[in-house]
Amino acid sequence: MMPLKSQFNIKISKDLLIQVKRQATMLGKSLTEHITDLVTQSLEENNIKNTGLLDSNDLKCLNKRLINIESIVSNREYLSKGIKPFTNYEAVNCTKFMRGLFREEVKKRNIDDNNDAFNELFENIEYFEQLNEFFYDRLKEVILSDKLNSLTGKELNELTDSNKCNCPIRKGLINWTGLTDLPSQQEICDKGDELLPLI
């Protein structure tokens, strides 16, 4: 059984048409056969080139590494001063920022269920750091609560292993929202939700 054929009209320059017709004639093919062969050959060559591309797991790994590097680089001015653990004041600012950004993203995406949105965010956080059930429950309480029930400096230090510029919550927010130009962790610690209108 012959494969089904369909008509395909394209506009090309007269010179190119003359060259293609001449080439088809020299090869003893009809214009349709010759163009079909050229397109097929081009697609096969493109497939060969594409086999060297990264698969989705490689891309995820690369994305994770880039976000880690960006987190460190965006805090470079603070690294020279020596990293200090999160204070309770900074933890309140971080909480206000992440809660505000979470709510803006939920509104932007028109997500009806905050629990579903939180679970999506948490998957992105866990992509960078496997968290125990306590942190899941605590973070959910902090993000979804209408009262300002902030994380503490101690909780953030435990979560980040006292490495302030490598916070998995910030990296998870970047991954979840797609906003790669979020303020540095230290800026978030210093200014909190004052930064949200700038994003």
Image (cartoon, rainbow, N blue to C red):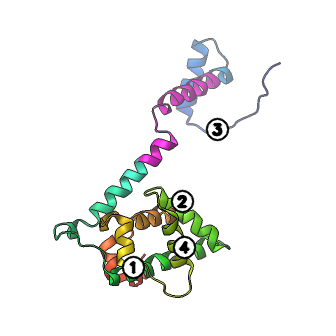
Q: Nearer the viewer, mark 2 or mark 4?
A: 4
Q: Is residue 15 above or below residue 132?
A: above
- Residues rendered magenta in the picture: 35-61
Q: Does the segment drawn in magenta span residue 37? A: yes
Q: What residue type is labelled 4?
A: Lys
Where does the C terminus fall, quadrant-wise?
A: bottom left
Give the mark toward the camera: 4 or 3.
4
Residue tagged 2: 123
Secondary structure, mark 2, is: helix
Q: Pick whichever of labels 2 and 1 is earlier in the sequence.
A: 2
Residue 152: assigned label:
1
At 54% from the left and 28% from the top, the residue drawn is 42
Expressed as whole percent of the image width and height from the top left, the position of residue 165 reads: 30, 66
Q: Do the residues labelled 3 and 2 touch (CB within 8 Å)?
A: no
11 left or right, relative to 171: right
Which residue occupies the foreground of this view, 173 or 178?
173
Sequence-wise, the earlier of marks 3 and 1 is: 3
Q: Dot 1: few (<14), some (14–19), or many (≥20) neighbours within 10 Å? A: some
Residue 162 left/right relative to 175:
left
In-front residue for pair 199/133: 133
Residue that label 4 marks: 140
Name the residue carrying label 3: 10
* Label 2 – label 1 distance at C-alpha: 22 Å
